[in-house]
Image (cartoon, rainbow, N blue to C red):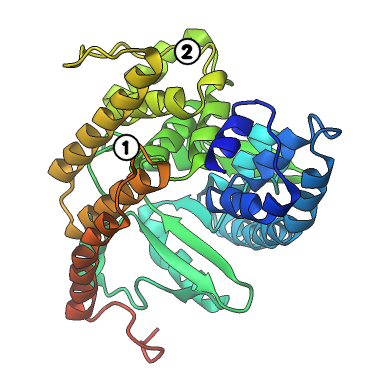
Amino acid sequence: MQNALISLLNSEKIHIASHDFRNFFYLCSKHRVCGQVQLLLQKEPEINQSLLQFFKTRRKPLQLQALQQFAALQELINSATNEKKAIILLKGIGLSHQLYQEPTLRHSCDIDILISQQDLMWFHALLKNRGFLPMDIAHIPKSYQNLIFKIYNHLFYYHPQKNISIELHWKFTPDNQFDQLDYDKILFSEKKHVLIGQFALPILPDHLNFLFLAFHAEKHYGSQLHWLYDTLQFAHRIPLSQWNEIQEMAREYKIDLHLNALFYRWKTFLPNLTQNIPFPVQRKIFFYPANQDTFYKKKTILLHLKHFFGRLMIIHSWIQRGKTLGFFFYSLYLHRCVKRGMPAAFFYLCLPYFFIDYCFRKMFGIFISSSKTSA
């Protein structure tokens, strides 16, 4: 079934038997590519008429969720604009409109926004007043703010009645990537806008947007196909003359390894879509493959491992190390990078790290433990 999904994303013709529609939709949901798959099915409706109708019906709740997120986002942006607070939408509806001209096509689990670090307390209070529950930190004393800014790069909020989640980001990562980035300059002077109806959504400038998406995809080791497919669609929007600049920026922001790994992951899973993408020159590796297909698969695994251990070396927080370990094993298990697959048991090696994370939260006493936490 996964091979059929990858073939379809590679613009190849597939046939799914009617009794497999439910399983195929579940797999697409797991990889969050339901909208992209429906778009591809619409190109040849006579071949996939039944499957296309099945997707249209099953995607209605996801589209409704996207519209609810858009309404909440509009309220948040209007409130921030009235108080002269800078805000940028990351991924989500804005990216869906950019890539596919359809705001509800991409499946977004939450709303990610970038804010200025000094505005965190204002947004924190605003969301709490609007019924959002802070799922990471209920109360932020001044004495703990520097610790929070060092360990985290975002805080998570959830509205139980509306079933909407929001992440407030003040930087892209708690690690040393993007250290040279002036976030306030981007927020106040370099952001661009996309129009959805009459509403202008603030988003990242194109080059930085692509690098952030590439970093985000590889931070999760491409564990869901929608990260690979969306970043590749964005890559096709970049003129060939600008790729040298993109790679220079990646080196400056210390994400060149992420970008290189993403390129070869594209080549492994979506080879039919990589035309006109200038792949970076890599150093020779220690084996000589029998064919190109084997070469890219083995190289992806090597970059996977190199990237994983490289990240563990530079991550200063045990919380982030645990999450990195979890994403790494889950990605290998999900994609079956090794032919026999990675045993699912390896994924649970990360559980001790999450236990440390939990103890850390309890120990400091500033993290949510009950509904009695003070505002």
- Nearest to the observer: residue 50 or residue 317: 50
- Residue 294 in which image quadrant: top left
Residue identifier under label 2: 242
Q: Position of residue 306 (x, y in %)?
A: 20, 32
The answer to whether residue 315 shows anywhere in this view is: yes
The kind of residue tagged 2 is Gln
- Marks 1 and 2, the one that precedes in the sequence: 2
The kind of residue tagged 1 is Val
Question: Looking at the image, is 359 positioned above or below residue 219?
Answer: below
Where, quadrant-wise, is the N terminus in this rendering?
top right
The answer to whether residue 253 shows anywhere in this view is: no
Residue drawn at x 50%, y 50% is 86
Q: Position of residue 374 (x, y in %)?
A: 36, 87
Question: Looking at the image, is 135 positioned above or below residue 111?
Answer: below
- Nearest to the observer: residue 307 or residue 319: 307
Q: Position of residue 248 (x, y in %)?
A: 33, 17
> Callout 1: helix, strand or loop?
loop
Where, quadrant-wise, is the C terminus in this rendering?
bottom left
Residue ranking furthest to the bottom: 372
Label 1 neighbour load within 10 Å: few <14, some 14-19, many 20+: few
- Residue 216 in which image quadrant: top left
- Residue 100 in which image quadrant: top right
**Label 1, label 2: how many angstroms apart (C-alpha)?**
35 Å
Q: Position of residue 368 (x, y in %)?
A: 34, 80
Residue identifier under label 1: 338
- Nearest to the observer: residue 147 or residue 1: 1
- Residues tagged 1 and 2 counted as in contact (Cβ below 8 A): no
Residue ranking furthest to the right: 46
Left or right: where does residue 264 sit relative to residue 309?
right
* Tag nearer the camera, 1 or 2: 1
